[in-house]
């Protein structure tokens, strides 16, 4: 059967119905509200014969043209009680007719008003009393007000439900998680000869089952639907994508092409989201396949599809593809810009994210960033220690009123803490008050942890529990990481064992934190025992934590055991080969180092280039370890060489063991001078004022030689230097680092 009304998406009509109901109720209340008090003010000068009469009850002033006798020149106030019926009389506006009974002081009763109203209606031949309420409208109103039990009770006795009634019941049931009501509506629809073949209601039914997590029932509705338009297909694709059934969703998308059902932008969007839900090894080929299919049909440049493509490529780490999609978009909205900014921020290109945000602001005066944009840019500022940019964004947040959003405040607090301003982050946390959520507490714990304040992080964890909030998965990752950076082994073990008390099952990330905690403390045997006792398969993070601990303590055997697993799990990760080569080099196993170099060349693996960022005068500058032929870089190296010469006079010996090349020691020392963090420090010394804090971010772990050199420079120049590497913060001041040589 066909449809009986225009397709509706959402509950806008229900909201309009509620407004109409409120107006109707208000009219009824006004109709029987009894007498309305009015005040008449007579302003009668002694020589006037035409008084002016003003009504003080919300009605406009009326002027009487009747002739009256002169009265004393003083105001006379009379309080009147007029029935609404009298006020609605169609008298000329030029005169006010007040029947004599209205001047009585006795107030008419509600019963007398109703009697008068009824007699007036019958005597004047007016309309009869309103008919009883429409049962369909009643059910729709009950659904809009959340009274589902009453609405469900009325459904069996309803003789002819309308499409609007079915829709209201399904939307309300999905919102309330009422599976029984959805099933009842489904049964009623199957028995309805008018609407059982309505594609619109089939779409709503699939969406309701999908929201309830009842995917088999959603499939059944789709399979039994007599008529399937594009909306029915899209509803099923969305349900499959949300449930993580990527293969089936893509199969259904192929069926659409085979059955010549024309796909639209939403079809491709749901298909792309299904690809992301697939396993990591198959996600990228599937995304590219859907991308190509959409391009052939002319949908790849649609804003909705292109934005989803950018998000998919960002999650897969393929930034180049995302850039190509973004560049080819004919029109971009705030969501598109936000997706590309987030892509840069999530894939270790925070500088590009900040620059793109500037381009967004300059591209269109009417393009206003939303909260998602702001959060992404704040994360980018935190990623490169761009405190000045973060402060400018803080001012923008205040001007635009984004400080009313908890998500923005959480990101703002995290930005300050990740830029080394713990006290500012704590003030924002305190200012949030009762608006603080679990994310707020997690950010504070993580902030203390990355600065090495493990005991403060554990204290905040205890305060969170006392405040009545339950720690989640991220909470335990943050607090266990804080214990690891501070060497709090006993506290970390206790927290790990307490996870069951909060119904949190340990994941691979938690085991990785515990292995790192035990490994840094030198308890490698216990760390290995923990890995062997895991009930889940150890992830690359777990084995990587063990490998990092082996590098600290020079344990070759456990390092080889970890790498044997890592080479299988992450065959393209060159960092694992480099770490093992470093362990071999420190153990004087140079033949093994050569073997690893050959493996890197054989598999065409390249080590991640070291990169450091520094913000000077609200501008970001980046330095790489291989860019040592640039004249400005050579000047920076010369400045570092002067410091190194002075350090040698005080007993400093360059740590050339980290250079895995078979070259002379002098050449190794020259390579050490070109490390990116040293170049950034030199640039900061030249381009910042005396007493100004130098803030640097490194994409890799800070090496031992750079750590030693930076300590000396902070003492010699009397400058505070803050370096954030991939693991934690290092605050250098007066030749001392906040890490306490434990990193």
Image: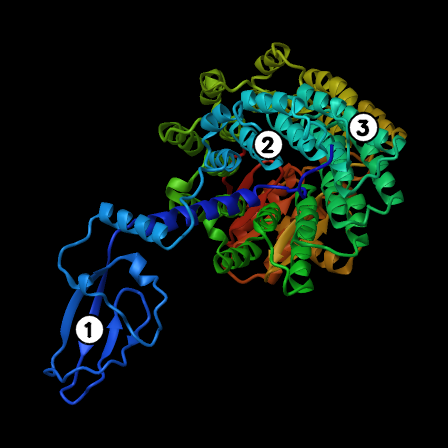
Secondary-structure class at tag 1: strand
Image x and y of residue 622, in percent: 69, 52
Image vertical order of residue 609 relative to residue 360, above or below: above
**For mark 1, what is the residue?**
41
CA gap, disc 1 to disc 3? Answer: 78 Å
Mark 2 burial class by Cα count in 10 Å: few <14, some 14-19, many 20+: many
Query: Which label lies toward us, 3 or 2?
Result: 2
In the rendered image, is residue 324 in sight?
yes
Total numbered badges shown on the rendered structure:
3
Q: Nearer the viewer, residue 81 or 507?
A: 81
For disc 2, the marked residue is: 166
Numbered disc in front, either 1 or 3: 1
Closer to us: mark 2 or mark 1?
1
Mark seen at residue 252: 3
Residue contact at pointers 2 and 1, CB within 8 angstroms: no
Q: Residue at x 20, y 86 (%)?
A: 49
Residue contact between numbered discs 3 and 2, judged by CB atoms under 8 Å = no
Q: Residue at x 77, y 27 (%)?
A: 226
Mark 1 / mark 3, whichever is N-terminal = 1
Q: Quadrant of the C terminus?
A: top right
Q: Which mark is residue 32?
A: none
Quarter assignment of residue 466: top left
Q: Is residue 608 visible from the viewing direction of this image?
A: no
Question: SS for tag 2?
Answer: helix
- The residue located at (30%, 73%) in the rendering is 61
Q: Position of residue 283 (x, y in %)?
A: 78, 30
């Amino acid at each position: 059967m066909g449809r009986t009304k225009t397709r509706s998406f959402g509950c806008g009509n229900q909201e309009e119905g509620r407004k109409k109901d409120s107006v109707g109720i208000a009219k009824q209340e006004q109709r029987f509200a009894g007498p309305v008090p009015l005040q008449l003010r007579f302003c009668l000068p002694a020589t006037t014969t035409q008084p002016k009469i003003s009504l003080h009850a919300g009605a406009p002033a009326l002027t009487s043209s009747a002739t009256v006798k002169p009265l004393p020149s003083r105001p006379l106030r009379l309080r009147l009680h007029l029935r609404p019926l009298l006020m609605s009389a169609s008298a000329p506006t030029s005169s006010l007719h007040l029947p004599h009974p209205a001047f009585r002081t006795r107030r008419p009763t509600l019963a007398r008003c109703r009697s008068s109203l009824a007699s007036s209606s019958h005597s004047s031949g007016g309309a009869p009393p309103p008919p009883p309420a429409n049962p369909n409208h009643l059910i729709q109103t009950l659904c809009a007000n959340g009274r589902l039990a009453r609405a469900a009770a009325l459904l069996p006795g309803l003789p002819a439900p309308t499409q609007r009634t079915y829709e209201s019941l399904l939307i309300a049931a999905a919102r309330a998680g009422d599976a029984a009501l959805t099933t009842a509506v489904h049964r009623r629809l199957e028995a309805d000869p008018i609407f059982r073949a309505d594609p619109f209601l089939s779409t709503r039914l699939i969406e309701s089952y999908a929201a309830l997590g009842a995917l088999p029932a959603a499939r059944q509705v789709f399979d039994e639907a007599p008529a399937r338009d594009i909306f029915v297909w899209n509803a099923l694709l969305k349900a499959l994508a949300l449930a993580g059934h990527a293969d089936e969703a893509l199969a259904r998308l192929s069926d659409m092409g085979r059955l010549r059902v024309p796909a639209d932008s939403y079809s491709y969007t749901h298909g792309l989201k299904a690809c992301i839900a697939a396993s990591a090894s198959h996600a990228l080929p599937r995304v590219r396949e859907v991308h190509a299919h959409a391009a052939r049909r002319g949908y790849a440049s649609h804003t909705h599809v292109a934005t989803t493509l950018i998000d998919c490529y960002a999650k897969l780490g393929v930034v180049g593809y995302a850039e190509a999609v973004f560049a080819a978009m004919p029109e971009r909205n705030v969501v598109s810009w936000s997706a590309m900014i987030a892509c840069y921020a999530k894939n270790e290109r925070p500088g590009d994210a900040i620059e793109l945000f500037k381009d967004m602001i300059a591209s269109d005066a009417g393009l206003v960033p939303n909260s998602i944009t702001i959060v992404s840019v704040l994360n980018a500022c935190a990623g490169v220690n761009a405190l000045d940019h973060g402060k400018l964004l803080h001012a923008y947040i205040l001007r635009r009123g984004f400080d009313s959003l908890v998500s923005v405040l959480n990101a703002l607090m995290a930005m300050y803490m990740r830029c080394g301003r713990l006290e500012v982050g704590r003030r924002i946390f305190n200012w949030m008050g009762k608006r603080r959520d679990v994310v707020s507490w997690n950010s504070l714990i993580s902030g203390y942890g990355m600065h090495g304040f493990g005991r403060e992080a554990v204290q905040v964890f205890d305060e969170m529990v006392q405040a009545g909030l339950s720690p989640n998965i991220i909470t335990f990752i943050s607090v266990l990481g804080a214990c690891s950076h501070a060497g709090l082994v006993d506290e970390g073990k206790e927290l790990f064992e307490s996870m069951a008390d909060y119904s949190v099952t340990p994941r691979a990330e938690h085991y990785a934190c515990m292995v790192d905690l035990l490994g840094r403390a030198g308890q490698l045997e216990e760390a290995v025992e923990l890995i062997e006792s895991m009930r889940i398969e150890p992830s690359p993070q777990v084995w990587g934590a063990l490998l990092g601990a082996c590098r600290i303590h020079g344990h070759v055997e456990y390092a080889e055991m970890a790498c044997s697993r890592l080479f299988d799990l992450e065959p393209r990760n060159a960092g694992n080969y480099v770490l093992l080569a470093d362990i071999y080099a420190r153990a004087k196993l140079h033949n093994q180092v050569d073997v690893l170099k050959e493996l890197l060349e054989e598999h065409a693996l390249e080590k991640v280039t070291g990169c450091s960022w520094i913000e000077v005068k609200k501008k970001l500058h980046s330095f790489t370890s291989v860019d040592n032929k640039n004249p400005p870089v050579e000047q920076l190296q010369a400045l570092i060489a002067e410091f190194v010469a002075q350090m040698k006079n005080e007993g400093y010996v360059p740590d050339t063991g980290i250079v895995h090349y078979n070259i002379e020691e002098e050449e190794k020392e020259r390579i050490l001078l070109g490390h990116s963090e040293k170049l950034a420090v030199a640039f900061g010394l030249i381009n910042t004022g005396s007493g100004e804090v130098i803030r640097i971010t490194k994409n890799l772990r800070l090496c031992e030689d750079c750590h030693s050199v930076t300590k000396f420079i902070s003492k010699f120049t009397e400058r505070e230097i803050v370096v954030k590497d991939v693991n934690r913060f290092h605050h250098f001041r007066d030749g001392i680092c906040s890490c306490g040589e434990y990193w």
